[in-house]
Each structure stands twice: as C-alpha cells, then as structure tokens.
C-alpha cells in the first residue's frame, strides 16, 4: 500500500528545546546504526535518496541540518514532520526507531569537511563587486530575490557544484522551495512563451499547474499566463538567465568565489 | 396536546423520503435514482457514473461553488461521499463521520471516532474513504480495525465489532460495501506482514457471517504458490472497496501486494491471491474464480483498484464484463461470470513486461527485480494508477482512468518479521520533479486502446466521475477541480480549490439541481450551476 498521507496539522510533535546538554551523547551502537539504515532504506530513501544523497527531497549528508540542530530535534522532525513542507511525520516509528533513524542520518553528515584553496574574503568582494551577484541573489537578507537565495548555499552544494554553477549556470536546476506532491521541481526553469498576439515572454518558472504558469520575466516581475491562451510554451532546461563567469573571472578568482559561497551556511 | 401529535404525524409521514430506508433493492437499482449517490462508487458495479445531465459541455463554464464543508479534522479528506434523499454522509481523516444537508452543507450530526493513543497504520495514514448505508444505518471502518454501525438519523452508535488486531498492523481505510443483508469489509496492513482477508458481517447484528483469506493456508488450493511458512505473513490486503453483481450473486474485490513488499526470496512462486481480483460468492464467502494480474509481485503493485462491471457485445457475443485499470500499468477486461481473460493493454509507458500472453499473464522482462544497488523501472511503486477510482460512462462508451507516469529505483534488503512493525524488505527512490507526469486517459473499454488523453502536470491522486451530461470531472495535485468533454477530452472548466485533491468526485441532485462534489485538502467542495437571477 505504501501511501504516505501528509499530516501537516495536529500531529507535529513539539521540537525539543535546544537547551545545552552537558552530558555527551553516547555514540550509537552498530545495531542502532544498522536498524536506522534499514528503516531509512524503506521509509526515507524514497525521497531523500539511498544514502541520504538527495532525490526529490534534500540531501542529508551535512553535519548540520537546517531543521534539526540537535539530535532531539532530529528525532522530532522524523516523528513529527516539518509543517509546510513535504516532510511528513513518521508517527508509526517508535521512539527507539526514531532515535535509530536519527543516528543513521547523523552518521551521513560525519564526512570530512571540504577544504577550499580560495580566499573567502576576496571571494566576497568579487561577489559584491565585479560579479554583481547581489543584483539577482540574496545573501543574509541583502540583494534581490530574482534568483536562488544563497544564504545557505554552502550547506547545499559541494565545492565542485558551486564551481560548476559559476561556469555553466544552466547545468544545475535549483529546486523550487515550494512543496509538490511529486517532489521538488526545478524552480528557475527558463521558459519562452508566445501569446496569441505574438508577444514573446521569457522568464524563469515560479510555479505551474495544468492550466496556468507563473514566471518571473526579464524585468523580475511576476507574469501569470493561461496555458490555453498561448500560441506556444517552451521549457528550456540547460539555459539560465545567469551569465557564465568562466571568462569573466580567472581560475584563482573562481576559487575565491567558491570559497566565499561555501562559507554561506546561514549562521549569521 | 394536539400539537405534538400533529408534529409526530408529520415527521413520520416524511421518514421514507428523508434518510430512511435504503433497502438492498434500492442499492441494486441505484442508477435508476440519479439524484442519489448511495454507494461508494455510485452503484454496486463500480462505474462512478452519474446519469444526471443538467450540467453539460455547453453550460459547465457556469459552475460555481455552492457550499464548502470545512472538515473538523485537519487531516486530508479522501472520502467519497454518499448521498441519500438530500442527506450526505462523508468521512473525515481518522474516520470521523459527518451527516450534512446536501443542499446547504449544514451539519446534521457528527460521529467522532474514539481511537487508542497508540494507533498502527503502517505504510499509510489513518485515512478513511467513506461509508456504506443500508436501511437506516451508516457503516464505517476505523483505523484501528473496528466496524461501526451508526443510526443514520442521529449518528448514535448502534454497535461496533472488532475486525482484526491493530497491534499486528491491521487497519480499515476502505468504505464498506452493503450487499443484501451483509456489510463487506476489507482491511489494510500488508506492509506489516499481515495475512489478508475479506469479511462479511450481519448488517443488523454485527455478527461475522464469513471470512475469506486472500492467502491460502498450507494445504489449501493455491498454497503451493508460497514457500515454507511465508503464507503466514503473505500480505494481500483488501483496502479498496469492491463491486457486486446482484444477478450473479458475486462480489468482486481486489487484493494487494504480498509481504515482504520488495524482497520475494522467502516466498517463491506466484503468491496467490495477492495482486489478484477475486470473485466471491456473496452468500457463502467462497471463491468462485480468481485472476492474478502481477504474479510474484516485488514492486508493491496492489490490485486494489476498482473492479468496474458493465455488459456488452464482444466478437458477436453478449458478455458480462469486469474491467480493471491496474496499478501495474495494464488495463484488463475479463468475463465476470468465469474470470476468462478477454483483453489487456498498457495504458502508460511501462518497462516491466512485453505485453500479456493469451491468458493475460504478463511476459515479464528480465532484471526487473529490486536489487541492493537499485533497479530503475517504470512505473514506480504507486503504479500506473492507484486506489482512486476510474469511471465508466455507458453513454459515451468509454473507460476513464487518471494515469500516473513516473519511474523509480527499486532496492532490496533482508526482511525480518516482527508483529506490528514494517515488513517490507527494501525501498524505492522516486524519480520526481518535471519528469513525473500524469494524464486522464479515455480507453476503449473492450480493447484498452487509448481514444484520447488529457495531460496532467503531475501524477494524479484523484479519481474521476463521468456524467450523463457528457462530462468527466477530476482533480489535480495542484488543487484544480476540472471538467473535460467526455467524448474528446477537451478541458472545459476548472476551479482552483487551493488544496491537494486526493479523493473521488461524485454527483447528486436536490430539488432538481445537480451538484458535483469532491474533497480538497481537509474540506469538501460542492459545485452547482449559478442560479439565474430571480
């Protein structure tokens, strides 16, 4: 049957407070990790990918998880879900099973931290200066929200993916933060629409359904279109309104910007 | 003293026309009362077709919300309402029952399920898909696997009986089906390694009249399709309401996946009667025939879709058909007297079988089994369609199915049985985003050939309704309730309800006005044509 029903109201378990616990958390036993792995495999991997590497749900291979700073909070998220997202609560897990899954998820984030050769301070200057990145992106509340919010991009993307997104922006399809029953969809997909009167509208997709589509056009305004009233509607995966920085920055400068972006973890 | 007597006389005089006697004879002839929607599927044959014709392709653009019922339980509503003589009975999440004035949405009574603090619903939520009504009683299952009988006029409890042990993973999500003087009840729980069955209870007393197990015990016919003791945890839930042919006296009911879901090593063989359609003698509960769609399933492709009954000519011979658009991606047409396979075609792009042989058995491709490293395959575990209903229109002569087009990576690992815990033996990683899509497909019911297809933005979770007015109604994940031309699939109207539509539409009439209703999120939306200005 395996049909999870999202309960986003009423069953959310209050998250444990992040009060400091002076007693160190005991290391999970091998049995707990194995049991957690097995439960993760059947119940979580469908969305989060096998090994938590991400799929229609986010990757969990991070030392810190946005919605679960502490182990108790992680158990709370697993059992209670995250209201307003596609993360449903697994109310059928026992408290022990929740703890076992949490142990396993925690183990996914215990990878050696990545080292960056670039200089983050210089990268920040390039971001604000020659790159003009803040014209489209937001970090820590500053900038414009036409393009993905980068405030926590260092949690989501590895150095290699950050660099790829700078030199070949269309290669990555940043997921929309909006919930969808079939998993995250590309949130900045390039669209080319032609109205019946022959007007061409280019923009990035915000949302879509059977009958309508919402775009940000080239001026950043929201445009709402009825699909049935269009002459054509093209989706252009692989394209991006962002320019490539492959030649605009030197290799060393790219390293600096990557180091800066990798430092953005939403901590400030 | 004259006034109370007079009032009493008035009330008594109205009882038969209010929520009074829904006899088995009325249920058998449900489609002769188009104003009512008296069973889960609108008739015992599972057609989900309303003969009502006031709303048409010409005027459907004038459809407007008539009223909204906001569920008192905030959980998603998957109910299929029942409407009898102006009263609507529906279930909320957790199986709470509500009776409403079907004209205004005003509440007449509400029954709150009393549920234990520890509730097991492994592999699904404590959802509920509707009630059955017989005589003056409303029947509903509970998530902790009880059958409950309520007085239709007041919601007062008449009786309740335990159906199975919730602590072992049994639950009830399906609407019961009233068959003569019996209430037929299916159960959920195959993800917990239950042994499935279908039950019949005396409608008046709640006494169990018969039980038929969907997995034969050692020594019984079909038991050689299991290895060792694997039948004891063989799954085979009966979690979606079946159909009934009063003339043949046969109940048609779909059976779900074997356990463990994704690891078939412990259960060599076809694993009868999982992923099968059963034809059961209603009087005795004995198996008349079976047809297995997916032998030795390892992809969770339950055959718990609606068996749709209709009659017609095939190759010059008048036949009684039962059709099913199956979760494995194929549409099947069978003779419902004998179970003979007549036709079958895929209705989605699937990757697991090179068609069906002359007996309807799939020609399975190699290397489709889940593995440690993952096997890419379409459809995903949710299948080409799912529990939500298809529709058959006798007037248009078409079978409509809301189809899912989505792939997955299937994984396998060892499974150990512990009562009341997951017993699945693997998992899957869906391929979602824009590659996952859906459609409403109109099939030739006698061949399965696709006549038209209306694309859906994402794989749907909502059923379909066809009407005598020439329309097909359905809903989207994104929240739109929509109407298509039944003959062409052309979209004619839609309304953004703002909630996930994960339920089945129905139609009914009060005072000659046609309504169309469908749940959206935790609420029920009811539509009608705008009234002309007075």
Image: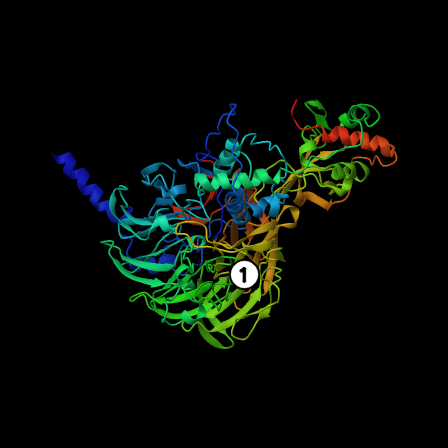
Q: Is residue A219 visible?
A: no
- Image position, residue A110 (x, y; %): 63, 37
**Residue A187 location, quadrant:** top right
- Image position, residue A195 (x, y; %): 73, 41
Drawn side of residue B399 relative to residue A259, left or right: left
- Pick the front one: B318 or B209: B209
Visual colour scheme: rainbow
Drawn side of residue A189 relative to residue B173, left or right: right
Q: Secondary structure at mark 1?
A: loop
**In this picture, is B533 found above or below B511?**
above
**In this picture, is B280 found above or below A108?**
below
- Image position, residue A206 (x, y; %): 67, 36
**Residue B32 location, quadrant:** bottom left
Q: Quadrant of the N terminus of chain B?
A: top left
Which residue is painted at 39% across and 63% down in the image? Answer: B214
Tell me if mark 1 has few (under 14), some (14-19) or many (20+) residues whose alpha carbon lies within 10 angstroms of its own: many
Drawn side of residue B483 relative to residue A236, left or right: left
Q: Is residue B150 visible?
A: yes
Residue placed furthest toward the left: B1
- Pick the front one: B10 or B266: B266
Q: Chain of mark 1?
A: B
- Pick the front one: B209 or B107: B209
- Please count the marks in the image: 1
- Pick the front one: B286 or B26: B286
Which residue is painted at 52% across and 53% down in the image? Answer: B471
- Image position, residue B68 (x, y; %): 44, 37
Q: Quadrant of the C terminus of chain B?
A: top left
Residue for badge 1: B328
**In this picture, is B270 found above or below A235?**
below
């Amino acid at each position: 049957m395996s049909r999870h029903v999202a309960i986003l109201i009423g069953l959310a378990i209050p998250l444990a407070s992040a009060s400091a616990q002076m007693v160190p958390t005991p290391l999970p036993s091998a049995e707990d990790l194995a049991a957690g792995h097995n439960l993760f495999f059947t119940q979580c991997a469908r969305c989060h990918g096998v090994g938590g590497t991400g799929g229609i749900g986010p990757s969990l291979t991070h030392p810190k998880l946005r919605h679960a700073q502490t182990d108790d909070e992680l158990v709370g998220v697993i059992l209670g879900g995250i209201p307003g997202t596609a993360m449903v609560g697994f109310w059928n897990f026992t408290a022990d099973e929740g703890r076992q899954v949490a142990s396993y998820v925690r183990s996914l984030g215990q990878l050696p931290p990545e080292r960056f050769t670039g200089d983050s301070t210089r990268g920040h200057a390039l971001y604000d200066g020659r790159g003009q990145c803040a014209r489209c992106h937001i970090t820590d509340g500053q900038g414009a929200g036409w393009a993905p919010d980068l405030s926590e991009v260092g949690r989501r993307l590895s150095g290699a993916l950050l660099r790829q997104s700078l030199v070949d922006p269309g290669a990555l399809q940043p997921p929309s933060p909006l919930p969808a029953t079939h998993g995250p969809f590309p949130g900045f997909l390039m669209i080319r629409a032609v109205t019946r009167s022959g007007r061409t509208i280019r923009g990035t997709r915000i949302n879509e359904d059977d009958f309508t589509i919402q775009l940000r056009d080239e001026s950043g305004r929201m445009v709402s279109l009825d699909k049935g009233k269009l002459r054509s509607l093209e989706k252009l995966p692989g394209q991006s309104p962002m320019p490539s920085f492959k030649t605009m920055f030197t290799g060393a400068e790219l390293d600096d910007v990557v180091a800066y972006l990798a430092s953005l973890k939403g901590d400030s | 003293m004259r006034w109370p007597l007079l009032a009493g006389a008035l009330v008594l005089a109205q009882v038969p026309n209010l929520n009074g006697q829904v006899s088995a004879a009325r249920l058998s002839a449900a489609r002769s009362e188009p104003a009512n929607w008296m069973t889960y599927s609108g008739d015992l044959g599972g057609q989900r077709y309303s003969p009502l014709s006031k709303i048409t392709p010409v005027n459907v653009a004038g459809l407007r919300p008539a009223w909204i019922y906001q569920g008192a339980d905030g959980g998603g509503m998957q109910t299929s309402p029942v409407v009898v003589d102006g009263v609507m009975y529906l279930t909320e999440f957790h199986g709470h029952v509500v009776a409403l004035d079907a004209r205004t949405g005003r509440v007449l009574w509400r029954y709150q399920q009393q549920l234990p603090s520890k509730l097991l619903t492994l592999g699904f939520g404590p959802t509920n898909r509707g009630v059955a009504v017989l005589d003056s009683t409303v029947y509903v299952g509970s998530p902790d696997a009880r059958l409950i009988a309520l007085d239709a006029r007041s919601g007062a409890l008449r009786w309740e009986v335990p159906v199975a042990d919730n602590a072992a993973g049994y639950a009830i999500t399906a609407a019961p089906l009233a068959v003569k003087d019996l209430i037929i009840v299916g159960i959920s729980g195959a993800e917990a390694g239950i042994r499935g069955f279908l039950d019949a209870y005396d409608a008046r007393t709640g006494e169990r009249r018969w039980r038929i197990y969907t997995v034969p015990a050692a020594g019984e016919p079909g038991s050689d399709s299991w290895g060792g003791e694997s039948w004891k945890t063989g799954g085979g839930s009966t979690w979606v309401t079946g159909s009934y042919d009063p003339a043949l006296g046969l109940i048609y009911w779909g059976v779900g996946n074997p356990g463990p879901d994704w690891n078939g090593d412990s259960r060599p063989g076809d694993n009868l009667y999982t992923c099968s359609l059963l034809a059961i003698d209603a009087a005795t509960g004995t198996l008349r025939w079976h047809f297995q769609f997916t032998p030795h399933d390892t992809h969770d492709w339950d055959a718990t879709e609606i068996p749709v009954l209709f009659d017609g000519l095939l190759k010059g011979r008048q036949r009684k058909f039962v059709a099913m658009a199956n979760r494995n991606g194929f549409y099947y047409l069978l003779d419902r007297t004998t179970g003979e396979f007549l036709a079958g075609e895929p209705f989605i792009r699937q990757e697991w079988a090179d068609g069906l042989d002359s007996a309807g058995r799939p020609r399975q491709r190699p290397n489709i089994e889940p593995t440690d490293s993952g096997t890419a395959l379409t459809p995903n575990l949710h299948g080409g369609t799912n529990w939500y209903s298809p529709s058959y229109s006798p007037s248009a002569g078409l079978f409509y199915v809301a189809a899912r087009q989505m792939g997955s990576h299937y994984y396998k690992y060892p499974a150990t049985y512990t009562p009341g815990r997951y017993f699945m033996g693997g998992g899957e990683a869906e391929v979602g985003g824009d590659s996952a899509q859906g459609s409403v497909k109109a099939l030739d019911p006698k061949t399965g050939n696709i006549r038209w297809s209306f694309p859906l933005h994402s794989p749907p979770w909502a059923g379909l309704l066809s009407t005598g007015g020439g329309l097909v109604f359905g809903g989207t994940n994104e929240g739109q309730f929509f109407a298509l031309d039944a003959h062409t699939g052309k979209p004619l109207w839609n309304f953004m309800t703002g909630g996930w539509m994960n339920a089945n539409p129905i139609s009914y009439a009060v005072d000659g006005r046609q309504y169309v209703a469908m749940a959206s999120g935790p609420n029920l939306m009811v539509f009608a044509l705008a009234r002309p200005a007075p």
